[in-house]
Amino acid sequence: MAARLWWVRPETFQATPAALALLNAKERAQQQRFIPPAKRHEYLVTRVLVRTVLGEALGVAPQALQFVCNEWGRPALASVLMSAPIHFNVSHTDGLVVCLVSTENEVGVDTELFARAPRLLALAPEVFAPQELVELAALPIEDQAQRAVILWTLKESYIKARGMGLALPLDGFAFRFEPGQVCLDVKPALQDDGARWQFQWQRFGSHCISTAIALSSQQRQSGMKANAVDYVEFCRPG
Ligand SMILES: CC(C)(COP(=O)(O)OP(=O)(O)OC[C@H]1O[C@@H](n2cnc3c(N)ncnc32)[C@H](O)[C@@H]1OP(=O)(O)O)[C@@H](O)C(=O)NCCC(=O)NCCS
């Protein structure tokens, strides 16, 4: 298994004292800064999810985990715990929080509501690459909204897996939808080989979830491709 995707619906998660106790002082202060209750809760759920699944994977108490961010804001575990390599990436939006975890591969994940399609279609010329725009426009009009959300989450999964967020130009890489697989073309300036990535998108109720997994050359040679993401609901610590 290349990666496991933990998911939780925030509205089903109880903000119990046990859950709150997993946050450190800085995180609790950050949580209080969110004004809308739903965003405050989403922040709590995200921290509990990340701390619990990484703590379990490493055999470390969730409260003991420390995080550092790279220059583009990507959180990673602090070096003291890096002896056991683990890769993770988080995405949260209204109604869903996900954390993609892998002990082998660099990963990125993004989730978005399909209902955000009108906004994305309005932004399309700014956020999609020229070839993506051509393929989007060539689709039947009734399929364009779904494609825009899929494309957007795929693009975000890639820029997040690279750890650079929007510092990577969104027109510097383009997705192609081949039968049974999603392929990535990357401009030379971005110094990457699109073929080393495995991408998947999935309809998950009213959300779209896209994942990016960087395969090693050994994994590519062994033909590891489809079904490499295992979806698991997160239900602890209630
Ligand atoms: C990181 C980024 C690329 C994604 O943000 P996003 O899609 O809004 O939010 P997501 O929920 O998917 O991801 C946020 C998480 O990604 C992680 N993250 C932050 N910076 C990151 C980076 N440079 N690389 C990878 N992951 C990053 C964090 O864990 C963060 O959650 P946390 O702060 O609660 O820990 C952000 O830089 C961004 O600005 N995105 C653009 C959003 C936008 O413009 N949307 C408009 C079109 S709908």
Image: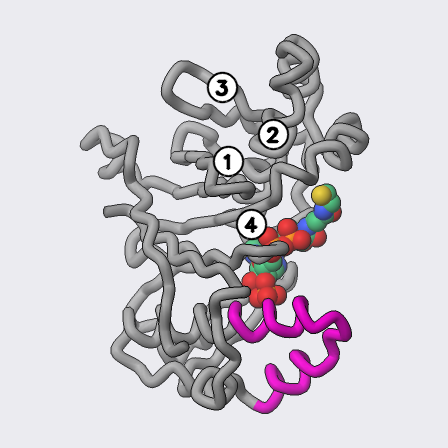
Q: Earlier in the sequence, mark 4 or mark 2?
A: 4
Q: Could you tell me the amino acid type at mark 4?
A: Lys
Mark closer to the observer (3, 1): 3
The label number, if any, that marks residue 33 in the structure image: none
Residue 204, position as x, y percentages in the image = 46, 42
Q: Could you tell me the amino acid type at mark 3?
A: Phe
Viewer-closest of 22 and 140: 140
Residue 188 in the image: above or below residue 41: above
Residue occupied by mark 4: 160
Residue 217 in the figure: left or right of residue 174: left
Residue 58, image quadrant: bottom left
Q: Which residues are magenta?
A: 25-46
Mark closer to the observer (4, 1): 4
Report the image quarter containing ligand 1. Answer: bottom right
Residue 220, image quadrant: top left
Residue for point 54% across, 43% down: 207
Rounded to the nearest angstrom, the CA distance separating label 1 from label 2 is 10 Å
- Badge 1 element: loop
Residue occupied by mark 3: 177
Q: Earlier in the sequence, mark 4 or mark 1?
A: 4
Q: Earlier in the sequence, mark 3 or mark 4?
A: 4
Mark closer to the observer (3, 4): 3
Query: Residue 32 colored magenta?
Result: yes
Residue 165 in the image: above or below residue 66: above
Residue occupied by mark 1: 192
Are the two marked residues, 1 and 2, in contact with CB atoms closer than 8 angstroms? yes
Mark closer to the observer (1, 2): 2
Q: Could you tell me the amino acid type at mark 2?
A: Phe
Circle 1 packing at 10 Å, graded few (<14), some (14-19), many (20+), is some
